Amino acid sequence: MNPLIEQMMGQLAQQQAGKLGAKLGMDDRQAAAAMKVAMPAIMAAMARNSASQDGAQSLNKALEKDHDGSLLDSLDDFVGRGDTTPGDAILKHVFGGQRGAVEQAAASEAGVKSDQMQKMMGMLAPVIMAQLGKQKRSGGFDAGDLIGMIGGASGGRESTAGGGLSGIAGQILGGALGGGAQAAPTGMSGIASQILGRLGDRQFQSIGKQLGLSPSATRGLVQMALPMILAALARNASKGKGAEELYGALERDHNGGLMESDDFILDSDPTEGDEILEHVFGPQRGAIERGVAEKAGLDKGAIGKIFSILAPVVLGEL
């Protein structure tokens, strides 16, 4: 489960889940199921909205102005009041005109009534913002982190509790990835972490300028794209002579020389990346990039550039 969602789930489960469920006409099991669907769904939409520079600034401003985390110190009173007015305002901004459809899909996913899910989301939205505000004040959060932790884990159909762009979260943001993007295997996820660990603000700023994005939004998109490329490589390698072909490509064209430079991501050749992606994603490439663009609220061309830059980097690291 996503660490931030797990932290909030644990806090609510220990203190307030029974009371919240009772207030909404749910038993403990239904309340837990509704939370596991609602939290990733809300955070996925927040991540999409924060992918643009204006969206990131808007989120940071809201956290600084209205959500300092103090709500978490009085959860009992907040849940007891059952006031969804603040949450309704947040959800109106987060989901826009999609809110009704989102709540219906979420209710179906969790096995509860639509009006129960509506109230559940209205109660959870301020709690999520409070947790983000608390984390921001501790120096452990910015908008790029939100994009990455929601979108970076997966794009396939996995448990909603995982907090990735899956389940109801995927429905909210378009579901355009279909079966073409799945969570990277554990070993491959380690490779993504190695690459991310070598990137700093200067590299994200340089790439962001090319794409018209803030450094934090760029970092979030890189965190989203790396596992998708790695997952597709893993899928291809598991088929027929796929592993042999991958090994041959690494031996022939990707000896790791690119990764010897501190500016490896700036030295990456997008033309070479296009060739890699045509092989890795095949005819699904366009649909995958459109899906990510819709989820992030960005132009498909910017998404295509991110993938093209990252593909040689991934093979260079392998």
Image (cartoon, rainbow, N blue to C red):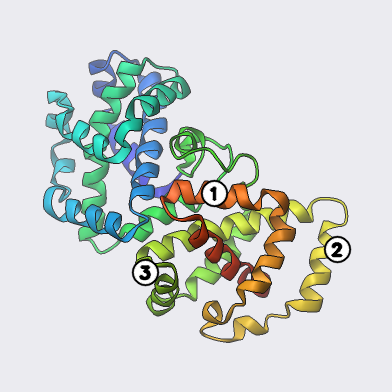
Q: Find the distance from the CA under tag 2 to the CA under tag 3.
A: 37 Å
Lower sequence index among marks 2 and 1: 2
Q: Find the distance from the CA under tag 1 to the CA under tag 3.
A: 22 Å
Which label lies toward us, 1 or 3?
1
- Residue in the picture at 27% in, 34% down: 124
Label 3: few (<14), some (14–19) or many (≥20) C-alpha neighbours in 10 Å: many
Q: Nearer the viewer, residue 12 or 59?
A: 59
Q: Nearer the viewer, residue 216 or 110?
A: 216
Q: Mark 3 — residue?
A: 215
Amino acid of disc 2:
Glu
- Residue in the picture at 81% in, 77% down: 252
Whether residues under marks 1 and 3 lie with C-beta atoms below 8 angstroms apart, the answer is no
- Describe the element under mark 1 as helix, strand or loop: helix
Q: Mark 2 — residue?
A: 244
- Describe the element under mark 3 as helix, strand or loop: helix
Lower sequence index among marks 2 and 3: 3
Label 2: few (<14), some (14–19) or many (≥20) C-alpha neighbours in 10 Å: few
Q: Mark 1 — residue?
A: 290
Which label lies toward us, 2 or 3?
3
Amino acid of disc 1:
Arg
Which label lies toward us, 2 or 1?
1
Relative to 243, say whether 253 is above or below.
below
- Describe the element under mark 2 as helix, strand or loop: helix
Label 1: few (<14), some (14–19) or many (≥20) C-alpha neighbours in 10 Å: many
